[in-house]
Amino acid sequence: MSTDTETIKGRYNLSHIIGRGRITTIHRAQDSFLDKPVALKILQTREQTELKTFKYEFKLLSQLFHPYLVQAFDFGYTKERFPFFTCELVEGKDLKSYTQEFRQNDFISLLKQLIETLDFLHLKGITHGDLKPSHIIIQQDANSQPTLKLIDLGLATLGKQQDFSNWRGTQGYIAPQIIYLKPSHNWMIIPFHI
Ligand SMILES: Nc1ncnc2c1ncn2[C@@H]1O[C@H](COP(=O)(O)OP(=O)(O)OP(=O)(O)O)[C@@H](O)[C@H]1O
Ligand SMILES: [Mg+2]
């Protein structure tokens, strides 16, 4: 496992942990080449299916460019041979924490941003697959307006899904068409109800 003082790939100086997933840890790191802080996500297993999914997430995030979608920069392996990738560091609160501070105008603006981002993905045939409050991080822009970043394409799928039997996701946020095993492009849930 990586330690807090480690330098990865001779380029990334690891700082503290800023998030944890099911089998990942996300650190703040300083990219000495780009000379800026980044988020560095390490997969804490070498299991082949998880590795394939992790690489796929990196590939998608590094090829998609949208202001409200987190962008990935670099892929590599730690000294212990755990895969990692770097991406934009999003400094803000996730949607669940942010709801405590909501103003009505913020809500409308954030909803528009989220729909715009999902539309961008859907037009490319991509389904996020794990849309939930902890994957929506709210930052303040230069004018102190709330701006969101959608993260985690770890369960994203490309193309029309006909078979939902192996679908993964988060209980409470799974789309109706998956629960009812019925493909549909007309249904979308937005996790603003929390
Ligand atoms: N680019 C980022 N900038 C800032 N924080 C981040 C970033 N990426 C992830 N995080 C933090 O780490 C948490 C976990 O990240 P993420 O959801 O990408 O991991 P995961 O392994 O895919 O999780 P899971 O599989 O459990 O959904 C996020 O909820 C968020 O708090
Ligand atoms: Mg996640």
Image (tube, grey):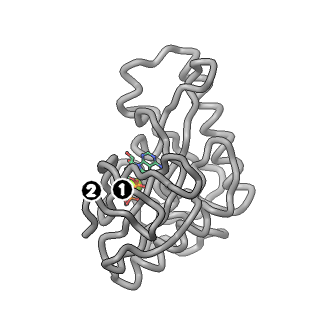
Percent position of residue 3, x then y: 25, 62
- Amino acid type of disc 1? Leu
Question: Which residue corresponds to the image point at 57% horizontal and 47% vertical from the top-left?
Answer: 188
Residue placed most toward the observer, 184 or 17: 17
For label 2, the residue is 4
Percent position of residue 81, x then y: 36, 80
Q: Secondary structure at mark 2?
A: loop
Question: Which residue corresponds to the image point at 50% horizontal and 50% vertical from the top-left?
Answer: 151
The label number, if any, that marks residue 37 in the structure image: none
Q: Pointer 2: residues within 10 angstroms few (<14), some, or many (20+)?
A: some
User: Is residue 54 shown left or right of residue 80?
Assistant: right
Question: Can you see residue 99?
Answer: yes
Whether the residues at callouts 2 and 1 have beta carbons within 8 Å, the answer is: yes
Percent position of residue 109, x then y: 62, 24
- Amino acid type of disc 2? Asp
Q: Is residue 134 above or below residue 126?
A: above
Where, quadrant-wise, is the N terminus in this rendering?
bottom left
Q: Pointer 1: residues within 10 angstroms few (<14), some, or many (20+)?
A: many
Question: Can you see residue 175?
Answer: no
Task: Return the residue found at the far right.
Answer: 123
Where, quadrant-wise, is the C terminus in this rendering?
top left
Nearer-N-terminus badge (2/1): 2
**Quadrant location, ligand no. 2:** bottom left
Residue placed most toward the observer, 70 or 153: 70
Residue placed most toward the observer, 86 or 148: 86
Percent position of residue 133, x then y: 42, 40
Question: Which residue corresponds to the image point at 61% horizontal and 65% vertical from the top-left?
Answer: 60
User: Is residue 72 shown left or right of residue 24?
Assistant: right
The label number, if any, that marks residue 14 in the structure image: 1
User: Is residue 63 shown left or right of residue 18?
Assistant: right
Q: CA distance from mark 2 to mark 1?
A: 6 Å
Q: Secondary structure at mark 1?
A: strand
